[in-house]
Amino acid sequence: MDGATTLGFISVLPPLIAIVLAFWTRDTILSLGIACVVGVLLAGEGLLGFPNLMKESLGNTSFSWIFLLEIFIGVLIAFFQRTGAIQSFADAIGKRQASRKRIGVTTWFMGLFVFFSDYFSPVFVGSTMRKVTDKVKISREKLAYICDSTSAPVSVIVPITGWAVFISGLLIGLGPIQTETDALAVFTKAIPFNFYAVLSVLLVGLIASGMIKDFGPMRKAEERAQREGKLIRDGSTPLISKELTNIEPYFKDKLLSIVWNFFLPVLLIITIAVGTYIGLGSAKTMEAFLAAAIFLGIVMRVQGIPVKDIMETALNGIKGIMPAIMILVFAYTINALSEQMGTATYLIETTESWLNPGLLPAITFLLAAVIAFSTGTSWGTFGIMIPIAVPIAIGFAGGDINTVVLATIAAVAGGGVFGDHCSPLSDTTILASTGAAVDHIDHVRTQIPYAILVGIIGLVLYLGLGLFGA
């Protein structure tokens, strides 16, 4: 089926079924699988359309990249635990007798620091801070929220990330934006108008510090953790399996060097990711994790851990990360199905007639959020929305770059992240659940009220900006 065509309202049903079933059954993998089968039947492809769809959606470099990234992340987390590195890190912070608020704020700061990759940030922050937050009885849902809301929202408002490069690249050739320099300058000017991302990051800090009290399902999760000591809900299924979370340090009578087993591998990841971004224009995150895993494997052998044990630990890391990989498999499959059925095209066609200068930023924000929520991809949303919404804004501005144009660019970026935060299909949301070792749907349920609150504030600001700035 041609992606430029659409099956109309039918095209919205597969992602809608997946999301409704996920919240109802609390089984994301089953829900996504059912939605994919229903989708191919609705598209008239028959039952054989399902395996064919999986081959098409998974047999590409995009999925291979994130698949390998997850594998290397699982191996590295397993190595961290087998060497006792995470235990040492937790003990080092625990000696300071930090309060829940201080630990929460520290976790928030770590997320802000690791701004260069939205894939690395939630997994790194979640896996390294999990034992620390567990000690002070911060629920895993709260940890996942902090990790998730300091990953993509930070990456999309820093002009030296892959997000900035991608969005700037989409702007080249639109109206007066003719060069990479022009595009990056316009993107940078639009950052203050990215209300959702900016406010999301601020809200996390206020929630973590206790200046704003938890509300909704998150409040219940925090009360459960503090009063009952239950960091996860009874009957929940953490996105990292026991093969990974139950790994004990090899040397039980001594702790190995935290410098060699933790700080140097992390420094290696940061150096490679940032260095390749500066030198090549693209952060090689997957290669960075591979290098760190190999480095730490060699260090483990030098420290006296047998090769057989190192390999078993690596395999346990791969097994432990498989629940997250399975969700990603079906998420990529349903995203490909949505593209084939023309979900985004249908959503755009139903709203085109409403567009005017005053409502453009607000409608753009809403539409980007709906597309990202339905497809689970913010970058895909950017690729769809920027070539449509920005030329319209430039046309309304008479060919200039005015406030409405900047607000529209920011609305696409912020709306994509907003939809991502509310969607169980989002890869970054999945990675946040993985890093925090929490049930994926529990993370989404507890995060949605915060995302909606910030989304409503952002929408009101876009309405005001569009009406008074047009």
Image (cartoon, grey):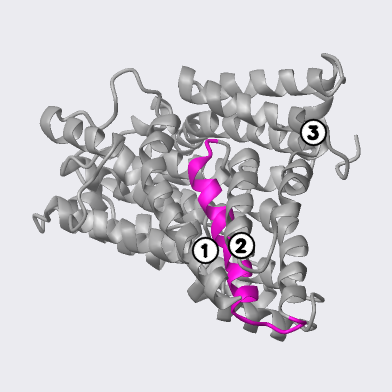
Can see residue 158? no
Residue at mark 3 = 8
User: Which numbered disc flags the more N-terminal residue, 3 or 2?
Assistant: 3
Q: Position of residue 71 (x, y in %)?
A: 57, 41
Above or below residue 429? Residue 389 is below
Above or below residue 132? Residue 437 is above
Point out the residue furthest to the right here. 2
Instruction: Please rate how many residues cluster around mark 1, counting C-alpha atoms within 10 Å: few if below 14, some from 14 to 19, many from 20.
Output: some
Residue type, mark 3 in image? Gly
Specify whether residue 318 is painted magenta: no
Residue at mark 1 = 463
- Magenta residues span 398-424
Residue drawn at (76%, 27%), measured in percent from left and top?
10
User: Which numbered disc flags the more N-terminal residue, 3 or 1?
Assistant: 3
Query: Secondary structure beneath disc 1?
Result: helix
Q: Is residue 270 left or right of residue 52?
A: left
**Residue 135 lies in what quarter of the image?**
top left
Q: Quadrant of the N terminus?
A: top right
Point out the residue furthest to the left here. 97
Above or below residue 299? Residue 439 is above
